[in-house]
Amino acid sequence: MEHIISVLVENKFGVLARVAGLFSARGYNIESLSVAPTLDPTTSMITIVTVGDDRIIEQIMKQLNKVIEVLKVVDLTETDFLDRETALIKVHTKPEHRDEAIRITDIFRAKIVDSSPTTYTIEITGNVDKVEALINLLKPLGIKELIRTGRIAIARETTRTASPRREPALLKT
Amino acid sequence: MKKSGAEIFVEALRHEGVKTVFGLPGGVVLKIFDVLCQQKDIELVLTRHEQGAAHMAEGYAKATGRAGVVLVTSGPGMTNIVTGLADAYMDSVPLVAFTGQVSTNLIGNDAFQEADNVGISRPCTKHNVLVKDVHDLAQTIKEAFYIATSGRPGPVLVDIPKDVSTERAEFKYPDKVSLRGYNPTITGNKHQIKQAAEEIMKARKPMMYVGGGAIFSDAADEIRELAEITQIPVTMTLMGLGSFPGTHPLSLGMLGMHGGYWTNMAMHHADLLIAVGARFDDRVTGKLSEFCPEARVIHIDIDPTSIKKTFHAHIPIVGDVRAVLRQMNVMLRSMDGNQAEMKGLRGPWLKQVAEWKRSHPLTYRQDDKINKPQFVIEKLYELTKHEAIVATDVGQHQMWAAQYFKGTKPRTWLTSGGLGTMGFGFPAAIGAQKAFPDKMVVCITSEGSFQMNLQELATAAEHKLPIKIVLLNNRCHGMVRQWQDLFYEGRYSASQLGKIPDFVKLAEAYGILGLRAAKPAEVEAVLKEGLKHKGPVLMDIETDPYENCYPMIPAGGAHHEMMLEDPPELNRAKKGGAQKRKVDEGEGVLPA
């Protein structure tokens, strides 16, 4: 099963290598990875999308917690969460396809952020299904280049949820 | 007054109470060595190879419980200690390794003797740091010692660029360390411990399985107390030997691939397994799906990643082994039932285990022409009378030593378990002897392992360290040869050592006493003379090249599927006149 894991780390050099190395050394997969500083400039948030059974995910969580510079690890998949991804899609636009490209972009509330005589570059932000749906619709036009950020995710405020949920965070003790 | 980075380094080591550093100089660490030679508090042991330095520091750390310290130069100096770091990481040995690095302005330029020390050591250290600013040096060293020795111990590498060792800063050593991402759990969860205690009270066939974590947590007294009040037999992993006296009536010795028949049978039939500071290594468990099939499992470990990594745990308890066992013992004592009742409850189980032991003790066929390695180790055990610190290398001799040396104290058994590093034993013995100059230190090795770090004979000779090297010379990589005999139809691919040095002459070349025993009749005299000798001594003991180590669980086998002797189809150089002998006869270890 797919899991989205948020890893709060100290913002120091070598930390990403340590986290990534942990996955490669133990044969775990990274489906996507995103890293950026948080509000506190001394920390960064790493969002990792990975796949594994419960035993593997438990090991991943524990191994991440073991890294000295890791401050907190949360498996968002165990909570109610929002996830988003941004993609930049450069599509070929023959003259007869330009209207179609604009229509598709509008339907998805995406934006054309750059245009040339033969291409549009479309920016889309949304959950992974939405991004992939757009990509699929644009494929017949001919995609020249595609860049995706990888997913980021955030837990919804738990007060808004009606049902009691499992403890979301495996906090470092 | 400002101090140079090198002076800060030495001052920090002084604050950490470091007395001995194992190392070898080179270009970028010259400033540090220059400061070291101008003071008397910290002794530098110059090794002949950096790998030797790393294993010496490991031996020192295993024998003392304090962090071992290594100091080497950049590039090849660092890459040569990688085996030692990996070994220490696998066996949770507290080590602080200082490596030199090229000046900060040269890092990344492929400078002379540059290597990415932090990158190379990342997967084989608990933590590592490149110090880029001399103002961070003292704090980093403080943290390195704290991380190496706390929680689940392990090696920490501190990379010091040349300019950091020469630049100056005010020296201020922090009193304590606070790392926001690192705070090991010490005391166990009370609820979990209570559950565990209840399971222990009602179990009919319990086993305690103790690993190296018990040694590093100094939990020998607590383990003994738990075993005695609950009458639970104790088995130890290779790393756990010494945490419970091998001579105690409740000791079942080592378990696993070369564990005793009675030990592995007891594991297979146990209804409760109390794993204490152990990690269910594949050499211990054999076939996981058939490991302890009937047992409920209590797993105590300070490292949460060890729990449920390879094997399930019904009651996981994260915490320091000693702290948790103390809590548990208090709880057990307050519960109903006393020692006599416990004895009654466990009686049939202990009787069964004793019966397994009686029917299948450790055996070997004694011979009057050729030395049996087991015979030599038994003799050595008799002559040293539990008093020696024993360091071993890796292979058959290591397993025989684990089987026949019944250690009674923690930190007297130094061996490379997880990584299985040939070449570990001799430098580890040097490290232990350096820590305990007045104790007897014996290195049990073989010609294969010993040749991997024999250059350290010079170090032992220079420091006049009276290490007793007992070299079981079977002229081959014995364990490899054993597997080839058993699983590769006897094709000896690269296991036979065609040319072997004359070890007596080799010892003499270093100014060390060399002795040789070729026949069984000579063994006792040679061992006695060697053990009595005041300085270092190398005893070359020729042993049967075809002897195999049993019991053995073939890789992937289950605990009740042990091989107890050579299979009939294996008909090698078996000589006539040999007679089977039971070595454990009369040593009734368990109450019958």
Image (spheres, rainbow, N blue to C red):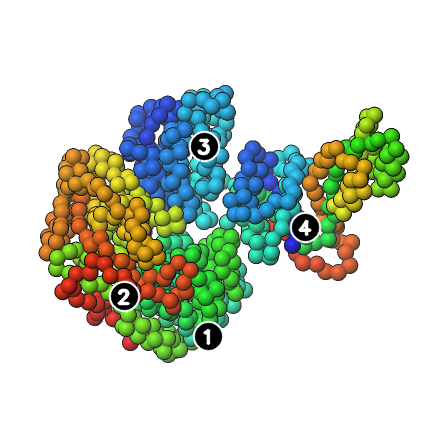
Q: Residue at point 15% right, 63% down?
A: B576
The residue that label 3 is drawn on is B117
Q: Name the residue under label 1.
A: B202
Q: Do the residues labelled 3 and 4 touch (CB within 8 Å)?
A: no
Query: Which part of the image, by quadrant, shows the C terminus of chain B?
Result: bottom left
Alpha-carbon span between mark 4 and mark 2? 59 Å
Q: Is residue B506 visible?
A: yes
Per the image, the residue denoted by label 4 is A76
Label 2 or label 3, whichever lies nearer to me, is 2
Q: Nearer the viewer, residue B195 or A116?
A: A116
Q: How far apart are marks 1 and 2 (CA)?
A: 44 Å
Residue at 21% x, 44% y: name it: B467
Q: In which quarter of the image is residue B358?
A: bottom left
Q: Quadrant of residue B221?
A: bottom left
Residue pointed to by mark 2: B568
What amino acid is labelled 4 in the image? Leu
Please state which of residues B217 and A96 is positioned toward the viewer in this rendering.
Answer: A96
Pointer 4 chain: A
- Residue B196 position (above or below residue B544): below
Mark 2 or 3, nearer chain start: 3
SS of the residue at dot 1?
helix
Query: Which percent across, then down, holds residue A60?
Result: 57, 50
Cα separation between marks 2 and 3: 52 Å
**Mark 2 residue element:** loop
Q: Mark 3 lies on which chain?
A: B
Q: Give the chain letter at badge 2.
A: B
Quarter of the image with the N terminus of chain B is top left
Which label's residue is closer to the chain start, 3 or 1?
3
